[in-house]
Image (tube, rainbow, N blue to C red):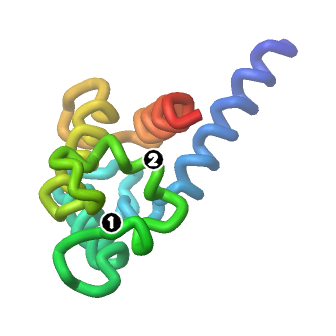
Amino acid sequence: MKRTIIVIAASFTLGSAALAGGWKESDANGDGQISKAEHDASVTASWAKMDKDGNGQISATEAGAKAAAWKDSDSNSDGQISQAEFVAKKTAWWQQADADGNGSISQTEYAAADAKHAKHKG
């Protein structure tokens, strides 16, 4: 009984983390799944927010606290993230997160991918 409660509590915690980590913004239609189209729209919206000066690049200043974590996304090592580099990073995350390959991400898949990403960052 104690293990069951712990597992349920852990699942709820992961679900809550997923909701707090951008789930609500990405699941635009609120159906409990993030489709590829919803993900792509979310990536486009994120890009628009991040590229504050609209020059087609995210500088370290624009990236702020995320700059160090995004160094691996700077494939041409120019010190900035282009939209293509940004989309490539987000697409790679999407492909890894869609664990069952059904073309959408469930809250469970989202939480697992988010946890895996956090583990690699730390």
Residue situated furthest bottom in the rendering: 53
Tell me if residue 63 comes above or below residue 86 in the rendering: below
For residue 104, the mark is none
**Horizontal relation, residue 9 to residue 90: left or right:** right
Measure how far apart labels 1 and 2 are at the Cα level: 30 Å
Please name whichever residue, 11 or 92, is drawn nearer the observer in this view of the structure: 92
Please name whichever residue, 117 or 113, is drawn nearer the observer in this view of the structure: 117
Q: Residue at x 17, y 58 (%)?
A: 37
Residue of label 2: 69
Residue situated furthest right in the rendering: 2
For residue 29, the mark is 1
Tell me if residue 42 comes above or below residue 96 in the rendering: below
**Horizontal relation, residue 80 to residue 2: left or right:** left
Mark 1 element type: loop
Q: Can residue 91 be seen in this view?
A: yes
Q: Which amino acid does label 1 sit on?
A: Asn
- Where residue 67 sits: x, y (%)? 44, 57
The answer to which quarter of the image holds residue 55 is bottom left
Q: Which residue is drawn at 28% across and 46% down?
A: 73
Q: Which residue is drawn at 19% across and 53% down?
A: 85
The answer to which quarter of the image holds residue 96 is top left
**Horizontal relation, residue 50 to residue 22: left or right:** left
Crowding at mark 1 (Cα within 10 Å: few <14, some 14-19, many 20+):
few
- Where residue 17 sits: x, y (%)? 61, 47
Q: Which amino acid does label 2 sit on?
A: Ala
The answer to which quarter of the image holds residue 58 is bottom left
Q: In which quarter of the image is the C terminus?
A: top right
- Where residue 106 sits: x, y (%)? 38, 40
Crowding at mark 2 (Cα within 10 Å: few <14, some 14-19, many 20+):
few
